Amino acid sequence: MSKENNMGDSNQRLDWHSGFEGGLRYSLRNYADDIEIEREHLLSKEPLRIDFLVVKKNEQVVIDNDIGRSFKKYNLIEYKNPDDALNVDVLWKCIGYTGIYKNLGNTVDAIKTDEITITICRSRKPLSLFKQLEKSGFVVSKLYPGIYQISGIVVIPIMVAVLSELYDKELNALKIMTSNADETDVRSFIEEASKLKRSGDKSNADAVLQISANVNRTIFEKIRGEEDMCEALRELMADDLKQAEKQGLEQGIFGTVDILRGMNVDDSTIIKRLSEQYKISEDKAKKYLE
C-alpha cells in the first residue's frame, strides 16, 4: 500500500474544506469589504452545489495575489482535498456546475459569460489531467507559480491552483495545508497570524493550523519544543485548547458518574465526590447527573 493510501483514513477524518475556507478567507482578508464568499453555494433546489463562490461586490477592485488576480465578478471555486481525484470528468463537472450557475440569473444573461471564472484548487499537480488535455489539443499554461490556466475548452477562464507550488506569500494560508509543507512557510504563517487582532481572522487562521498540524506533525512537534513559537501557537489555538480541555473534563466527569452509579453509590455522595475531585460547585455537579 502506498504512503498516500496509508494517509487516507487520517485525511478523511480532517475537515479539509473548513481548513480551506479558513485559508481562502484569510488569503482574501484584505478585500473583505469588496467581496462576498459563500460556502457550498446552492445551484438548485436539489443538493447540487459548488464548494465556494467569490463575488466581487466592487468590480473595480483588483485582488493582488496569484489566485485572485484573475478573478472577475463571479468566481466559482472547487476544492479537492488530497484524497479527491482531479480528472477530466471532474473538470467537466465543474464546467457543468458553472453552466447551471450562469442560468440562475433573475433575467436572461444577467450573469454574463465574461464575468465568470472557474478555479480548481488541489495540493498536487494533476499531471495525468494536464497530459490528457494537451493530447486533446487544449492548452495548459502557467500564469504564476502554482497557477495554471486551461484554454480552449470553454470561453470561461479555467484555473488550476496547485497549492504545494504556490510562491505568493499572501497565499501561505493555503500552501501550508499540504503534507510536507515548507517549514519556513509554516513558521512565517504562525508569526504573522499571532499578531492578528480581529477574531474572525484568528478563527480562520486557527482552521488552517488545525489541518496543517495534522499533516505536518514533525514540523509542529519541532515548533512546540521552541518556547517563543509554542507560545504563539498556544495563543492562536487558545479557544481550541479550552474546548479540548472542557471536553476532556466532561468526559472524565461522565466516566466517574458511570463508575459510581455502577457501584450503586447514591446521588448525593456522587455530587460531593465530583465537587471535590473536579473542583466544581455542587450545583454544577448535580447537573451532570441529570
Image: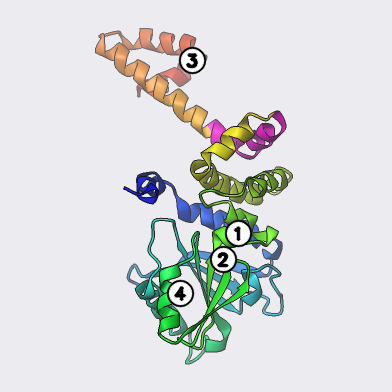
Q: Are marks 2 and 1 in contact (CB under 8 Å)?
A: yes
How busy is the neighbourhood of tag 4: few (under 14 within 10 Å), some, or many (20 plus)? some
Report the amino acid beneath label 1.
Arg
Looking at the image, residue 254 lies above or below residue 101: above
Disc 3, SS: helix
For residue 278, the mark is 3
Determine the CA span between mark 4 and mark 1: 28 Å
User: Residue 195 placed where, x, y %?
Assistant: 74, 44
Report the amino acid beneath label 4.
Phe
Determine the CA span between mark 3 and mark 1: 39 Å
User: Residue 32 placed where, x, y %?
Assistant: 67, 63
Residue 232 placement, left or right of 261 = right
Task: Give the labeled residue for mark 1.
Answer: 25
Query: Disc 2 or disc 3, which is closer to the eye?
Result: 2
Q: Quadrant of the C terminus?
A: top left
- Determine the image quadrant of residue 272: top left
Q: Earlier in the sequence, mark 2 or mark 4?
A: 2
Res. 137 visible in picture: yes
Query: Disc 4 or disc 3, which is closer to the eye?
Result: 4
Q: Which residue is at 57% across, 33% downward? A: 221
Q: Which residue is at 33% across, 12% downward? A: 267
For residue 37, the mark is 2
Please name the colour scheme applied to the rendered image. Answer: rainbow
Looking at the image, residue 239 lies above or below residue 197: above
Q: Which residues, given as a range, are shown in magenta?
A: 227-242
Task: Give the labeled residue for mark 4.
Answer: 130
Asked whether residue 107 is drawn in magenta, I would say: no
